[in-house]
Amino acid sequence: MQNKNEKKLYYNLKKSVDLSRLPKIEGYNFEKNDFEKILESFNTTGLQAGELGRAIEITKTMIREKVPLFLSYTSNMVSSGVREHICYLVKNNKVNVLVTAAGGIEEDVIKARMPFSVGDFNAKGETLFDSGVSRIGNIFTTNEHYTYFEFFMRKVFDKLMEEKTKDGYCIVSPSEIAEMMGRLIESEEEYDFNSSIVYNAYKNKIPIFCPGIVDGAIGDMLYFYKKNHSNFVLDTARDHERIIDYTLQQEKTGAIILGGGISKHYVLNANIFKEGLDYAVYISTAQGFDGSDSGGNVDEAISWAKVKPTAMHAKVYCEASIAFPLLVAASFAKKN
């Protein structure tokens, strides 16, 4: 016999709206054995798979409509194997503007000569230090990587001094440093320049903006270089003008933003000048509870006119080395 309280519980609820028009939650059926269908099934899987599915569809739309595309990424993306995915996009002219941190430039060149190694998140810092090894999460790099890079950067600075000095001063922007790095790496022995983001960006005339270029090995080397070349001047405002001018020339713009930091904000800020991005895809583990720009969602960007209220957008809460390769496979690299 049914309990009276139970009857009240079940029958006192509001009548539900009809959800039959919405896609049903359904994961991939592995009996089909079709990788492409796995990616398509994300749209109806729910949770972050659903958001990744939406990000893929937005990316497909940007590609189909040939929207100028900004790609923003933190330096750890280049430390990792995501470097190869970014290089694929640059080599095949699938993006129009790159924005990254200092490590996103320098580690690309370093890895063109010597690969990084798979390490351990739990490796002891003291042990690694005594072994001449540095750790980026579970990725290992060595002191030798940076020794060779210092020789390379001296050539870059010297060539800029030779070609850009005017009225006694060599005034260059971060993007011009990146361009020179891409130009010179081709002539370096023992460097696989074809695998380099910096080289392929130079070759395809894709600008690399790096507003925080001194926050890394390049900045450290520039410190010593300026001791003997005080007339070497870094003009970051020149790049600010360049990226904003480019943005203003576009009817529509879209962005894929991996992680946060200065790279993310530099793209968003430039798009304020055209009342915001028309398409935005975020892939990040950062959350907005602390008020950080890195964790801010797209609605926060809309409040600043960095993204249009009408924009197609998605934020995938996932570490980008997992989500971004899937997005590339399902959109840029899809053969049809």
Image (cartoon, grey):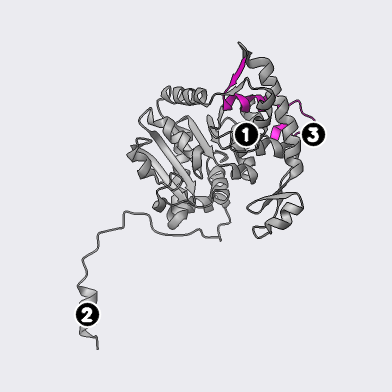
Q: Is label 1 in a helix, a strand or a loop?
A: helix
Q: Residue at coordinates 40% horizontally, 25% vertically from top-left?
A: 251
Q: Give x and y (percent) for residue 20.
A: 31, 57
Label 1: how many Cα within 10 Å (few below 14, some 14–19, many 20+): some
Residue in the image at 68% along x and 59% along y: 123
Q: Quadrant of residue 156?
A: top right
Tell me the amino acid under the disc marked 3.
Glu
For label 2, the SS is: helix
Magenta-colored span: 169-195
- Badge nearest the viewer, 1 or 2: 1
Q: Nearer the viewer, residue 285 or 217?
A: 217
- Pointer 2 local density, CA inside 10 Å: few below 14, some 14–19, many at least 20: few
- The residue singled out by tag 2 in the image is 7
Kind of residue sitting beneath label 2: Lys
Q: Which residue is mark 1?
A: 219
Q: What residue appears at the point 70 percent right and 57 percent down from the top-left corner?
A: 126
Residue 73 position, x and y percent, is: 54, 40
Q: Which residue is mark 3?
A: 190
In-image side of 211 versus 190 (left or right): left
Q: Is residue 265 magenta?
A: no
CB contact under 8 Å: marks 1 and 3: no
The N terminus lies in quadrant: bottom left
Q: Specify whether 7 is left or right of 152.
A: left
